[in-house]
Image: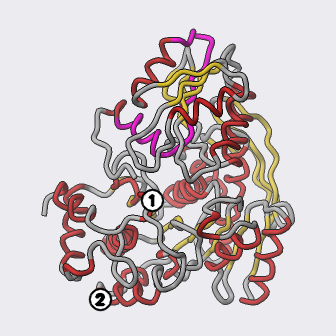
Amino acid sequence: MTYEQALTYLAQFINYESGQRVPYVPEHFNLDAFAAFLRELGDPHRAFPSVLIAGSKGKGSTAAMVAAILCRAGLRAGLFTNPHLVTLRERTQIDRQLISEPAFAALVSELQGHLRPAQRGRPGRFRTFFELTTALSFLHFARQQVDIAVVEVGLGGRLDTTNVLTPQVAVLTPIGLEHTHILGDTLAAIAGEKAGIIKPRACVVSAPQEPEAAAVFEHRCREQEATLSMAGRDFGWQVIDASAEGTRMRFRGLGHEIDDIAVSLVGRHQAANAAVAVAVCLQLRQKGWTIRDDHIRHGLAAVQWEGRAEIIGRQPWVVLDAAHTVESARCLADTVSELFGADRLFLVLGMATDKKVEDVVAILAPLAHEVIVTAFRSPRACKPQRLADEVRRHGVAVRLAETPERALAMARAAARPTDAVCVTGSVLLLGEIKAHLLNQRLEFSG
């Protein structure tokens, strides 16, 4: 099987990321059935220790930070994240190196041998696209003998495919109202789903949470006799300086003080993610892993995570940021206002219909001199005219572009060297932009 054949094969399976909806119940999201499938593969998920990260925002950034620190500590660290921007191989990394095309194709071919033709394209106990990419990653990590894997939960937590793991540390990033049609329409309901990754006598690290979510996590930890380290209560951080070059901070808590930490990712909100990553690594240290303060400093100074306040141009600033939730839109608004000091902001915006379009536009549009709206190539894409109507409600100039590439070109053409261009709204939009800039084909655009 070639790499292209592997992609074609995976495309036959149900892919919930592309907007296919089924009830979020065990009959469809069946961990026992997936665990049985992994047994056929030799239980690869039991071959390595792990850190499992659930939450509504900051999961990817936090995962990248933890993995970067572990790599600096000399550990062979796997990293499984989702979604990807351009290539599916981004989801499966070791020491921040993407799985190769031949290795990816070989693993898909191996998985194919364990699947019957009837298991394609059907819900229920049959395998899905996300299950197969998860199994593939676990097989890769096991075969390559990683020392530890950092794994990002796909959706929720309780019924997510990744929850077959029994992690060394379970991590909960901030909880917000997202995927409400699946996870519930209250913070408590959503937090209950995320709390499903907390296993008996687990070690748990949580980011700052709203009281409603924090109460759910505390209750779950008591039930499971798990230890909970909560940001703001057990550890904290202080931002020393924030700029377009990154953030400097200090960490306090869990019996440690680490000063003058430089975080390469842009935005004050990344300091909160970094503090959680530090807390995770300190808990691993407590369990016997050799992770020194200098490993933490060097890892955070070098961490890379595309699509999160990613600067791809200067004079004018050109920034890519996947702000598709209310919380992430607020973080982006703060970052753009504080750090880039632009005369005018040109916003390139494309969103998915299942997001809180009105709320995100209400936060971002008033910052802009002009908004250029567009649609990415997906049935989930919001119609540009609807986005334009929402922008006009805030009295902001708006233009429509037929493609994301054209939208970026229009914004760059209009911007002066002292201005800023920000591409935002959906990971799918950023993926098309990145593929265009890298002259690569976009894989599985959702």
Camera-side residue of 332 and 185 = 185
**Total residue callouts:** 2
In the rendered image, residue 429 lying in the magenta stretch gets the answer yes
Question: Quick one: SS at disc 1?
Answer: loop
Task: Give the residue displayed 42% in from the left and 46% down from the top.
Answer: 85
Residue carrying label 2: 40
Residue shown at the point (66%, 18%) measured from the top left: 369
Give neighbour class at mark 2: few <14, some 14-19, many 20+ (Cα, 10 Å). Answer: few
**Is residue 286 toward the left or the right of residue 308 in the image?**
right
Residue 32, compared with residue 151, is above or below; it is below
Circle nearer the N terminus (1, 2): 1
Q: Quadrant of residue 117?
A: bottom left
- Above or below 96: residue 309: above
- Residue 409 sits above or below residue 51 on the image: above
Residue 19 image label: 1
**Three-letter amino acid code of the residue under disc 2:** Glu
Please, what secondary structure does the residue beneath circle 2 have?
A: helix
Q: Residue at x 42, y 53 (%)?
A: 96
| 393 in magenta | no
Type of the residue with mark 1: Gly
> Dot 1, crowdedness within 10 Å: few (<14), some or many (≥20)?
some
Q: Is residue 140 above or below residue 329?
A: below
Residue 67 x %, y %: 52, 59
The picture places residue 185, in percent across and down from the top left corner, at 71, 66
The residue stretch that appears in magenta: 414-435
Q: Where, by quadrant of the figure, is residue 265 drawn?
A: top right
Asked whether the viewer can see residue 427, the reply is yes
- How far apart, in angstroms, are the residues tagged by discs 1 and 2? 29 Å
Q: Position of residue 402 (x, y in %)?
A: 40, 28
Residue 5 location (% of width, % of height) = 16, 59
